[in-house]
Structure formats: C-alpha cells, structure tokens
C-alpha cells in the first residue's frame, strides 16, 4: 500500500503549527519564508524565540523515488 506524501507546503504548515504551540505562550512566533520576505525559492520558516534569537529552517523534499 502506497503512503500519502506531504508536499513541502503541507509539511511547512504542519511544522509551523507544531513549533508555534511550543513558543507562542512564551512570546515567540513563527513565519514562513514567503511571509517574512526571505528571498529564496525554497520553503521554510523563520522562528523568532522569546529571547530575541531568530532561526531560519529550510524545507527541502529530499525523497528519492
């Protein structure tokens, strides 16, 4: 049986929700590369931590068919 594949966009959305649940209460937030204006063709997230740190997480589907 073939498993359903997530697109990069779907994975980005799910990962953003997961991270947001952990950091929003403390004052952090997550935005997508697109919404943050990051100049790249990749999907990804910008994670803003409550202490002012910022991380960028790039999402690339590396599955081989």
Image (cartoon, rainbow, N blue to C red):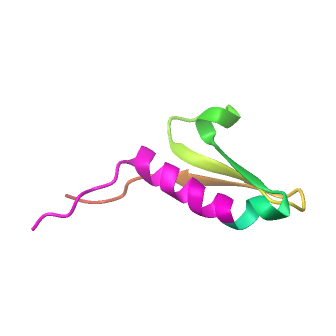
Res 49 visible: yes
Q: Is residue 30 left or right of residue 12?
A: right
Residue nearest the viewer, comparing 33 with 2: 2
Q: What residue span does the magenta drawing correspond to?
A: 1-21
Asked if residue 19 lies in the magenta stretch, the reply is yes
User: Which residue sits furthest right?
Assistant: 51
Residue at x 76%, y 58% (from the top left corner): 24
Return the x and y of residue 58 as percentages of the image width and height. Answer: 56, 52
* Up/down of 2 relative to 9, above or below: below
Reply yes or no: does residue 41 show up in magenta: no
Where does residue 17 sit, x and y in percent of width and height?
A: 58, 56
* Residue 20 vertical placement versus 44 (above, below): below
Q: Which residue does the image show at 58% across and 54% down from the upper left?
A: 16
Q: Is residue 33 above or below residue 15?
A: above
Residue at left 62%, top 40%? 33
State the image quarter where residue 5 is shown. bottom left
What is the x, y in percent for residue 9? Answer: 44, 44
| Relative depth, front residue between 46 and 40 | 46
* Quadrant of the image containing the N terminus: bottom left
Residue 38 seen by the camera? no
On the image, the x and y values in percent for residue 35 come to 64, 34
């Amino acid at each position: 049986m073939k498993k359903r594949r997530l697109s990069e966009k779907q994975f980005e959305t799910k990962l953003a929700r997961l991270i947001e649940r952990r950091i929003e209460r403390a004052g952090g937030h997550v935005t997508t590369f697109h919404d943050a204006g990051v100049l790249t063709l990749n999907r990804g997230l910008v994670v803003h931590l409550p202490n002012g740190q910022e991380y960028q997480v790039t999402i690339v589907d590396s599955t081989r068919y």
